[in-house]
Image (cartoon, grey):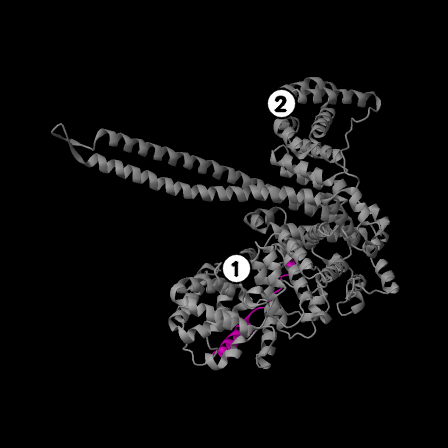
Amino acid sequence: MSSWRTLLLRIGDNCPEYGGTSDFKDHIETCYGILMRELDHSKDDILAFLLQCAEQLPHKIPLYGTVVGLLNLESEDFSRKVVEHTQTNLQDALHSGDCNRIRILMRFLTMLQVPEEIERVMVGIEAYLSIRKHTCDTGFSAFEFDDESEKAYGEKDFLEDLWERIQALSSNGWNLDSVPRPHLLFEAQLVAGKSYDLGPISCPEQPAPPPVLSGVTCGRQKHEAEMNYPRRLRRLNIFPASKFEGQQPIDRFIVEEYLLDVLFFFNGCRKECASFMVGLPVPFRYEYLMAETIFSQLLLLPQPPFKPIYYTLVIIDLCKALPGAFPSVVAGAVRALFERIADLDMECRTRLILWFSHHLSNFQFFWPWEEWAYVLELPKWAPQRVFVQEVLEREVRLSYWEKIRQSIENAPALEELLPPKGGPNFKYSAEDGSERAEAHALSVQLSIMVKGRVTSQEIISWVEESIISVHGFTVALEVVIQTFLDIGSKSFTHLITVLERYGQVIAKLCPDLDKQVILIDEVSSYWKNNAQTKAITIDRMMGYRIISNLAIVNWVFSPPNVEQFHASDHPWEILRNAVEKTYNRVSDLRKEISSLEKAVLSAEEATAKAKADLEAAESKLTVVNGEPVLGENPARMKRLKSYTEKAKEHEVSICDSLEAKTALLTRALDENEALFVSLYKSFSNVLMERLHHASLDEKKGLVPSDQMETMAVDSEEPSAMEMDKENGRQEKSDANGEIERNSYKMGENQQWCISTLGYVKAFSRQYATEIWPHIEKLDSEVFTENAHPLFRKAVFSGLYRPIHEE
């Protein structure tokens, strides 16, 4: 990288390129001097790279704006091009709907222009806000009962809160420290520079409103808007206000913008991302705000901008970059979220479990588990106890059982929450009774056949003649599944090999839903001590179409699993896998069809061109043996006819593939519809009776008002949130600790209802794009007036659909 590029990229950083100093004035002067020398022979390159830096390092825009201002004093042509290109890029971003680019380019343009019309802009915004409706999207809040946010922000939505802070900044003369103002260092020179007028900017046409505005159309519009223009941030507010003292009200928004931009533009460069995050141009400490922003992204609903693993890696790198500060802040965030885990959205809870277990695996699984040992005194369904249990299980998956037991040696009683030592539960490992011995002998015989590479058809015949006709279907299924799983238990490769080679045998045995449910039961029995392998096996069987998604739904909602809905993630993991695999089938087919449609157009063009070339050649007159003949020479004519035939064959082949894929998509969409109808009917049925017996609260649904005070975390109470400066532990008195241990008074049925409704909302929100096309059928068969109001509320809030419809 040439020196001028490095200087532009690293301007404002405490880096070797600038002698390790952070003096903005020195940086700008050095960068300006190098650019002026290079401008004559690298003008276009400098222009392109400068604009790229401004877009991808927007927290440095004030520095880049000042550099452009200084260059304007010597090269007006270059500065004019900067303004023109920025406006062109903004116009492109407006028409493509690229919100990030629109925001950043607007920010850069304001640095390049004199803000003479700021008051007119303020008046226009105020006029808009006066007619704008207050927004409330409870279905996308990380906390189910977010009283703390309501208290802190007076029930203002994001835009209202931002506008109030901007007004406060305006009243303060626009003075703040979180935005550098390096141009003031060069004000005497910059005032002599020439200014440039912007051309007109056109906004894209707005779509016409629907002819009939119903709850369904309104919900669809909201969902589409959420997909096209997702929220960048929904604050968690997990730290007390005391952690942000010394900052102006607007500072939080500005630093959040900096952090979100770095996360966005450096999503493929985790080390660079962490480096820029810790080097923002602000004069105050912001570790708490940085942690809260990252966790807000990790737990953002309906989904984070990037895969959760990205945020996991960034947090790890930040802990290494700031070893004296950030680990204790992260620990404080975990403790704060753990205290409010009962109110945390079920999807967010799952993400937090996966993140925390992965995070600990990168730090020798160290955590002061003794702080949470009290969860053993809570009921088995208490959210805090379930959280600890699920984290420990995920840790075992990432390591091994003995290692995790060793990691909790400071709280040995928590061994009760560890999963069983993973291992197969093979029914024929020992002979118990004559009947078991006979089944064992059949299993041995089948195992010998598999090792001898006997064909699937031969095994099917043997099963029908030697087992089903003698012992019946149940014994046959048990022998076949137990034997196949035992052979496949050695490794994932062994499992895949068995399923690929002998999946037909299982499919022949279990052709319908009822038998497939029994099959899943058998798999569950074999892997009862290893939830991960159980989930993988069921997922693979669905992938090979040995079992259907409807069978998985029926199995998950069977009584033994329903009883675990509030105390274990095992059934939910299997259900999530089934719905996700169904969704992926549809998504993959849509991508393939889109690609084939483009290929069809290309093939049609190629066929038309080949045909035109052939016709043109046939229309020509050539002289052969002194006589005029219609058509070119025979050799070329033969080639052209061959090209035309092959082009037509290729076109027909692609059209056939497109037709086949379209038929598969139609079938997949039908399966999708059947899946969601079955899923929501199952949810509705299991919830109806239990909700009938659960006490209700008018505002908070199932949580009784007399219990809310004991379950909530008072964000203004330092004893519950403060961390020790040295080790990050909470400063809690023994009395408070005793209150915490005895505060959980939720009944089991009530907790079951809260958890299950939380999963209803999570599934609705996560797969809303696939659910909306089938909404009419779901409305007529499931979401009827006979369905429980709280069930409908959970579904509708997840779909971003008005709960009370006309």
Residue highlighted by disc 1: 213
Task: Identify which residue is drawn at 48% across, 41% down.
Answer: 592
Q: Counting residues from the N terminus, which is met first, the one under dot 2 or under dot 1? A: 1
Instruction: Identify the amino acid type marked 1.
Output: Leu
Secondary structure found at label 1: loop
Residue 122 magenta-highlighted: yes
- Locate residue 202, reporting x and y percent: 41, 66
Closest to the observer, 424 or 401: 401
Q: Is residue 112 left or right of residue 156?
A: left
Instruction: Identify the amino acid type marked 2.
Output: Ser
Residue 78 magenta-highlighted: no
Q: Is residue 254 left or right of residue 570?
A: left
Closest to the observer, 382 or 259: 259
Closest to the observer, 311 or 512: 311
Task: Identify which residue is drawn at 38% across, 67% down.
Answer: 40
- Locate residue 319, reporting x and y percent: 69, 58
The part of the chain drawn in magenta is 117-141
Vertically, is 638 above or below 254?
above
Q: Is residue 407 left or right of residue 787?
A: right
How many neighbours does mark 1 have within 10 angstroms: few (below 14), some (14-19), or many (20 or more)? few
Quadrant of residue 345 within the rendered picture:
bottom right
- Locate residue 622, reporting x and y percent: 16, 33
Secondary structure found at label 2: helix
Say which mark, if any, is on residue 456: 2
The answer to whether residue 715 shows anywhere in this view is yes
Closest to the observer, 669 or 215: 669
